[in-house]
Amino acid sequence: MLPILADLGFVKIYTNGIFLVLAFFWSTFFLWKNISLTAFKEDEVFDGMFFSLLGGLIFGRLLYVVLHASEFGFSILRIILINGYPGFSLYGALFGIFLFGYMFATSRKISLGKLVDYAMAPLLLAIGIIKLGAFFAGTEVGAETAIRVAIAYPHLDGMRHLTPLYESILLMGASYIAHMVLMAIRRNKFYPGFNFVVFAGLFSFISLVLDPIKAFGTMVFSMSFDMIVSSAILLTVIPYMLYYFRNQIIDLFKKKKGSKKK
């Protein structure tokens, strides 16, 4: 693994830092391309993006601190000094992004339902690139495995799953799906805001499926925190999707019954 990409003596270039910059650049470019298809004001959208990112940083850090309270205690310095005491909660960051995005859109009287459709694919792409950086940096580790497709980490026993790499690939695939859904929304096949439901379903599904092959997860009541949240989201999204597509599902069953009778 390569946590430090380059050591120039007076400054160190960290792998995670490089991929964070790449994630920001490509997701911002993707968002700009999407917004250029609309009547939204670009400067207003990007003001909202930066404000949302601020919310993501705050809540991502706060939730991590709450979940690891024993490590931080009541020390404000430990909470603030991220380099010395690193850690962010991805679900906390997403909550902060959507909360601050909602606050910004409300204050500017922007249709959040329409705007969010254009932001979901870039957001999934950004997370996918960040996960790829975590894989190369070795900051996220898979569980031990006996399968051939595995990797060894320094100072850790056994061969381990390529979990962050799998997660990165799946998230980038989810970004493509979200973009296709956006195009369908623009053709009035789905209602404005539907892409948020797609994002919630895809992200929570990927997180839930890969959680068993992750190592060093945050545990709450002897269960993985990510698994708890992902399960709760899916238990909300799946019934909603079944209800939303009920007519199509009923028609599909009718067609199957008709073909069997023939």
Image (cartoon, rainbow, N blue to C red):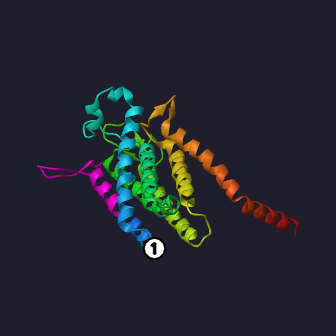
* Residue positioned 38% across, 38% down in the render: 62
Spot occupied by residue 179 in the image (x, y as percentages of width and height) = 50, 66
Give the magenta-colored segment's residue range. 1-26
Query: In the structure shown, which secondary structural element does the residue marked by tag 1 occupy?
Result: loop
Where is residue 82? Give x, y as percent: 28, 40
Seen at 36% across and 40% down, the residue is 61
Residue drawn at 50 percent across, 59 percent down? 174
Relative side of 213 to 241, left or right: left
Does residue 162 show up? Answer: no
Q: Residue furthest right?
A: 261
Image quarter in which the C terminus is found: bottom right
**Residue 25 counted in the magenta span:** yes
> Residue 120, how many percent across, how many down?
48, 59
Q: Which amino acid lies under the numbered mark 1 shown in the image of this protein?
A: Leu
Position of residue 262 relative to residue 202, above or below, is below
Q: Residues within 10 Å of mark 1 (few under 14, many from 20)?
A: few
Say if the magenta span includes residue 60: no
Residue 202 higher or lower than 58, as above or below: below
* Side of 101 relative to 79 (left or right): right
Q: Is residue 179 visible?
A: yes
Q: Residue furthest left?
A: 10
Q: Circle 1 sits on which residue?
A: 37
Nearer the observer, 184 or 71: 184
Q: Quadrant of residue 243?
A: bottom right
Image mark count: 1
For residue 37, what is the image quadrant? bottom left
Q: Nearer the viewer, residue 137 or 106?
A: 106
Along the viewing direction, whichever of 136 and 245 lies nearer the viewer: 245
Q: Position of residue 124 (x, y in %)?
A: 45, 57
